[in-house]
Image (cartoon, rainbow, N blue to C red):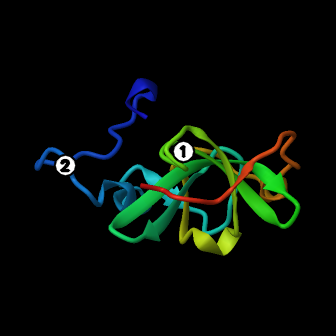
């Protein structure tokens, strides 16, 4: 986000185990409550949180591009309800049709470890 002129998430304590969850309250962000392509999905998990970018849908699941998904950077399938926030920058214009995610053209993994 910093490369695009946003502050991103900052902390005064160095490493912060809950920083993934902080994206849900990003001061420059807007929580759409529903996924759109490119939004930052935020979810809780044991020991903290997990974030990834919405990359489309596969059947009745959303596809998330994220790091540390089964110890790798990849696309994985999740239920939309697994995520409690879908964040875009406040100045990002969202149209009604943006909520109709395109089918992901690929073979995403099943969700797995996020540690």
Which residue is the site of mark 2? 11
**Residue farthest along the bottom direction in this orientation:** 81
Dot 2 surroundings within 10 Å: few (below 14), some, or many (20 or more)?
A: few
**Residue farthest along the top direction in this orientation:** 3
Name the residue nearer the viewer: 16 or 73: 73
- Label 1 sits on a secondary structure element that is loop
Which residue is the site of mark 1? 91
Tell me the residue at 43%/35% (across/down).
1
In the rendered image, which quarter contains the C terminus?
Answer: bottom left
Image x and y of residue 102, in percent: 86, 48
Image position of 44 (left or right of 111)? left
Image x and y of residue 101, in percent: 82, 53
Image position of 29 (left or right of 88)? left
Dot 1 surroundings within 10 Å: few (below 14), some, or many (20 or more)?
A: few
**Up-down: is 109 above or below 49?**
above
Query: Which is more N-terminal, label 1 or label 2?
Result: 2
> Which of the 4 image quarters holds residue 92?
top right
> Which of the 4 image quarters holds residue 78?
bottom right
* Of the two numbered discs 2 and 1 in the rendering, the one whose residue sits closer to the viewer: 2
Tell me the residue at 38%/55% (across/down).
20
Image x and y of residue 57, in percent: 80, 55
């Amino acid at each position: 986000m910093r490369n695009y002129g946003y502050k991103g998430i900052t902390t005064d304590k160095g490493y912060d185990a809950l920083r993934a969850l902080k994206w849900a309250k990003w001061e420059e962000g807007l929580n759409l409550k529903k996924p759109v392509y490119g939004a930052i999905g935020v979810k809780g998990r044991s020991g903290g949180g997990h974030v990834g970018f919405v990359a489309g849908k596969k059947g009745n699941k959303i596809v998330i591009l994220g790091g540390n998904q089964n110890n790798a950077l990849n696309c994985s399938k999740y239920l939309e309800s697994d995520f409690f926030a879908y964040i875009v920058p406040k100045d990002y214009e969202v149209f009604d049709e943006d909520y109709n995610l395109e089918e992901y053209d690929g073979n995403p993994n099943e969700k797995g470890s996020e540690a």
